[in-house]
Image (spheres, rainbow, N blue to C red):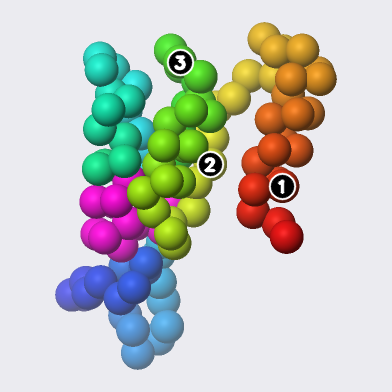
Amino acid sequence: MPYSCEGTALSADSALGVYVKLDIGLGVEGKYLPNIGRLARAAEELGFAGLWSSETKHDPFLPLLLAAEHTSAIALGTSVALAFGRSPMITAQTAWDKISAVVD
């Protein structure tokens, strides 16, 4: 079947309404932070549905903050964020701040 890009979904057969949303992960090697905004904007423009950050070497929340400054529609999230390495209070405050930023 031919594939065509429609919005944030990749369509295998638009007549049947079958769509697969594609997400992409942020790399955390080297000096990656200065390029996060450009990469996030490019992912959004290419039609990716989500952008994920992981806590494999660095904090997963800062890259998402930088990505949020440069995007408007792509979903942002953490694929790995270890709770046991943080105090329960810090984890709760981070979650509260994230929710407060998107909910009026």
The residue most toward the bottom is: 15
Instruction: Look at label 2 and name its amino acid.
Output: Gly
Please count the marks in the image.
3
The residue most toward the top is: 85
Q: Are marks 1 and 3 in contact (CB under 8 Å)?
A: no
Measured along the vertical axis of the image, is residue 82 above or below residue 85?
A: below
Extent of the magenta region: 40-51
Closer to the camera in the image, 76 or 69: 69
Q: Which mark is residue 77?
A: 2
Instruction: Look at label 3 and name its amino acid.
Output: His
Disc 1 or disc 2, which is closer to the eye? 1
Measured along the vertical axis of the image, is residue 40 above or below residue 59?
A: below
Looking at the image, tell me whether mark 1 or mark 3 is earlier in sequence order.
3
Disc 1 or disc 3, which is closer to the eye? 1
Report whether residue 23 is seen. Answer: no
Report whether residue 96 is seen. Answer: yes
Mark 1 and mark 2: Cα distance apart in space: 15 Å
User: Which residue is drawn at the image coordinates 77% and 12% (left, top)?
Assistant: 87
Q: Are marks 1 and 2 in contact (CB under 8 Å)?
A: no
Q: Residues within 10 Å of mark 2 (few under 14, many from 20)?
A: some
Quadrant containing the C terminus in the rendered view: bottom right
